[in-house]
Image (cartoon, helix red, strand yellow):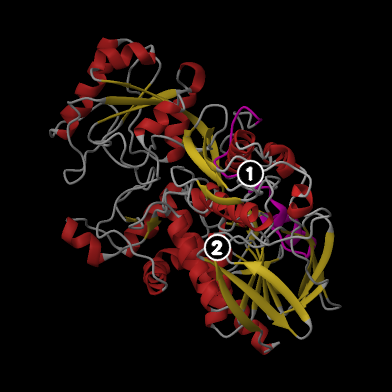
């Protein structure tokens, strides 16, 4: 197998790596490929300043609205240059908006222009920086000169690359597969269509289900792999492929240990993701699923001789030889340049199709056939993810698509967008009430049960109500990086010191809301309720004191359980179960693992377990080819 040579320099704390293959040179940023690099502008900054007046040197402030919260940014000018940009007050999501801000700031400083393109996958965060730059430049008297300097060009790429394994998709499953393939001895190229790396794993809460006696037994949690298997089958309405479920439940703890070997730290205690039907959810010690992506990016930075990550690269077609084996990928870079990757094996890890409204409606003849999944039902995936391109690629190479009607809705959607934001439904010490202020469901039920009950409520919406137990400090970021005060600043939640005042702001009956809280507290105190809610004596406590907080929620498309048919080796298969030579798939783009309803916490377990499986097997296939 051929190897690449690598040189590394550090720019503003980020690793800039140059990969060399023969005479071909490709410059890439780790984790944010193709951003932060200087381009050739038709007119330089110096040329713009030649006949202009000096700027007003100083540090200027702008108030901007990010994706997650408003924040204050500052820009420092000399009389002829931008010398510093400070956006550290932002609350943007790690791996998405936060990383986009860092990359764009470096572009501005490197190229001395306020014209920077938005980063695909982090548009709103990009716009917040653009708006702040314009504001501060006007204050400094520099706007007219800076706006004439064009945006930096993205780096050039070669027309052809050769490698052992090509992974399509740089999310959790794709990067897990790529790293596993490298560990097995392969050279790997990863093609990611967005300008950010990590996909929807970045914005997940990071819950990973696995039976783990070392963590569970000290908590008094009784669990076993057979129980995990049976629960997963039950959650999927027993329509799952048992062989795939066995592989998932048998090997999920190995995925935890593998992630730990890459530097991921998990909390000492297991919890329960929304709809997990058990306390076996492992959560990263640092917020969100971006923890996994950061560890993967560090591995990539340290193994640049074997793995190349290419962003802004949309896979368009699989290349097959005369035998039908998959031997490469045709892609489009930056929407303009044709690129071919020749390889011995391809792994598709492009995620699901929940963001493709037309497609999801066309296959919606199963669990949610009575619900119109149009634009009024949002999607939790970041745009432009979850469009289903990987399914079309696999089908074009002869793979079968299965279980496409198995679409999961999540109860934690934000009205209007469907994104999972603000107060989350996962965790404990919260109640769900309808617009009359009444509880209507067991908050610990499966996700499909929760959503069906929500649709049955007035206007198909509800409120999640929490108190100081969940948020003892309004300025302390929660597990997702959000604070109560940021949520309030965006107008996404309501807050009050008393239940009566909270009910008034929610527009619900105060007596009903108090009765709902009292009923929940009675269960926590050892009682029972009409919905079958079971309290956890290690995690639940009575909700009695303010401040109180409430947030409106709606069901949203969260996960599409159908996709590419795979076997236990993660090989993509045709309608007769025959593997497509050289083609593998992992993650949400596959079908058969979760049945009609996925348990909360099983998606990350799936991505890591089957991602590792696909990477290892693809590398072995490539070595033998």
Residue 419, position as x, y percentages in the image: 53, 37
Residue 503 as seen in the image, left or right of residue 611: left
Residue 448, position as x, y percentages in the image: 47, 37
Q: Which residues are magenta?
A: 374-401
Q: Main secondary structure of the magenta part?
A: loop
Q: CA distance from mark 1 to mark 2?
A: 18 Å
Which mark is drawn over residue 383?
1
Which residue appears at 57% of the width and 27% of the height?
416
Which residue appears at 41% of the width and 64% of the height?
249
Q: Is residue 166 above or below residue 361?
A: below
Q: Which quadrant holds residue 429?
A: top left
Residue 123 lies in magenta, yes or no?
no
Q: Is residue 165 above or below residue 277?
A: below
Secondary structure of the residue carrying tag 1 is loop
Q: Which quadrant holds residue 540?
A: top left
Tell which of 255 and 297 is nearer to you: 297
Secondary structure of the residue carrying tag 2 is helix
Tell which of 27 and 3 is nearer to you: 27
Which mark is drawn over residue 173?
2
Tell which of 24 and 562 is nearer to you: 24
Tell which of 74 and 337 is nearer to you: 74
Answer with mark 1 or mark 2, whichever residue precedes in sequence: 2
Is the Cβ of the residue at disc 1 closer than 8 Å to that at disc 2?
no
Residue 463 as seen in the image, left or right of residue 138: left
Residue 579 in sight from this viewpoint = no
Residue 576, position as x, y percentages in the image: 70, 66
Foreground: disc 1 or disc 2: 1
Residue 555, position as x, y percentages in the image: 50, 32
Residue 596 as seen in the image, left or right of residue 529: right
Where, quadrant-wise, is the C terminus in this rendering? bottom right
């Amino acid at each position: 197998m051929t190897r690449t040579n690598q040189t590394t320099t550090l720019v503003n704390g980020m690793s800039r790596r140059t990969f060399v293959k023969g005479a071909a040179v490709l410059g890439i940023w780790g984790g944010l490929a193709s951003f932060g690099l200087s381009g050739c502008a038709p007119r330089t900054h110096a040329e713009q300043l030649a006949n202009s007046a000096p700027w007003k040197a100083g540090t200027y402030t702008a108030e901007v609205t990010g994706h997650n919260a408003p924040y204050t940014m500052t820009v420092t000018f000399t009389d002829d240059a931008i010398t510093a940009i400070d956006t550290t007050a932002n609350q943007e999501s790690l791996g998405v908006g936060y990383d986009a801000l860092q990359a764009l700031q470096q572009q501005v400083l490197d190229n001395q222009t306020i014209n920077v393109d938005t980063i695909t996958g982090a548009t709103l965060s990009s716009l917040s920086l653009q708006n702040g730059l314009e504001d501060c430049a006007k204050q400094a008297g520099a706007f007219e000169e800076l706006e004439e300097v064009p945006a930096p060009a993205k780096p050039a790429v070669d027309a052809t690359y050769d490698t052992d394994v090509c992974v399509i998709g740089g999310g959790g499953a794709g990067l897990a597969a790529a790293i596993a393939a490298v560990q097995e001895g392969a050279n790997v190229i990863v093609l990611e269509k967005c300008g950010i790396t990590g996909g929807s794993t970045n914005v997940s809460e990071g819950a990973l289900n696995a039976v783990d006696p070392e963590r569970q037994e000290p908590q008094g949690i009784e669990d076993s792999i057979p129980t995990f298997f049976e629960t997963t089958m039950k959650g999927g309405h027993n329509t799952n492929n048992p062989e795939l479920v066995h592989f998932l439940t048998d090997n999920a703890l190995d995925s935890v240990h593998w992630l730990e070997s890459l530097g991921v730290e998990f909390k000492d205690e297991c919890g329960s993701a929304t709809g997990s039907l058990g306390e076996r959810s492992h959560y990263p010690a640092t917020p969100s699923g971006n923890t996994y992506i950061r560890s993967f990016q560090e591995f990539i930075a340290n193994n640049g001789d074997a793995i190349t990550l290419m962003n802004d690269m949309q896979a368009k077609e699989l290349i097959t030889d005369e035998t039908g084996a998959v031997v490469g990928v045709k892609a489009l870079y930056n929407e303009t340049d044709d690129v071919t990757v020749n390889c011995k094996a391809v792994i598709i890890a492009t995620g699901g199709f929940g963001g493709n409204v037309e497609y999801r409606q066309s296959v919606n003849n199963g669990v949610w056939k009575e619900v119109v999944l149009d634009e009024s039902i949002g999607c939790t995936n970041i745009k432009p993810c979850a469009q289903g391109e990987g399914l079309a690629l696999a089908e074009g190479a002869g793979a079968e698509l299965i279980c496409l009607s198995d679409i999961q809705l999540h109860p934690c959607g934000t009205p209007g967008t469907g994104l999972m934001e603000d107060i989350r439904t996962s965790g404990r010490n919260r109640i769900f009430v309808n617009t009359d202020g009444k509880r209507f469901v067991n908050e610990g039920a499966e996700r499909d049960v929760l959503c069906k009950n929500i649709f049955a409520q007035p206007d198909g919406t509800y409120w999640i109500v929490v108190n100081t137990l969940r948020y003892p400090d309004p300025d302390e970021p929660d597990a997702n990086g959000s604070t109560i005060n940021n949520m309030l600043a965006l107008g996404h939640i309501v807050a009050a010191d008393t239940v009566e005042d909270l009910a008034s702001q929610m527009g619900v009956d105060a007596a009903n809301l108090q009765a709902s809280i009292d009923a929940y507290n009675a269960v926590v105190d050892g009682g029972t309720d009409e919905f079958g809610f079971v309290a956890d004596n290690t995690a639940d406590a009575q909700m009695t004191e303010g401040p109180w907080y409430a947030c409106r929620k709606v069901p949203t498309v969260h996960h599409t359980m159908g996709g590419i048919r795979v076997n236990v080796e993660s090989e993509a298969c045709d309608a007769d179960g025959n593997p497509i030579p050289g083609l593998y798939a992992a993650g949400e783009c596959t079908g058969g693992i979760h049945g009609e309803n996925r348990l909360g916490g099983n998606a990350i377990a799936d991505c890591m377990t089957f991602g590792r499986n696909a990477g290892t097997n693809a590398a072995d296939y490539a070595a033998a080819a």
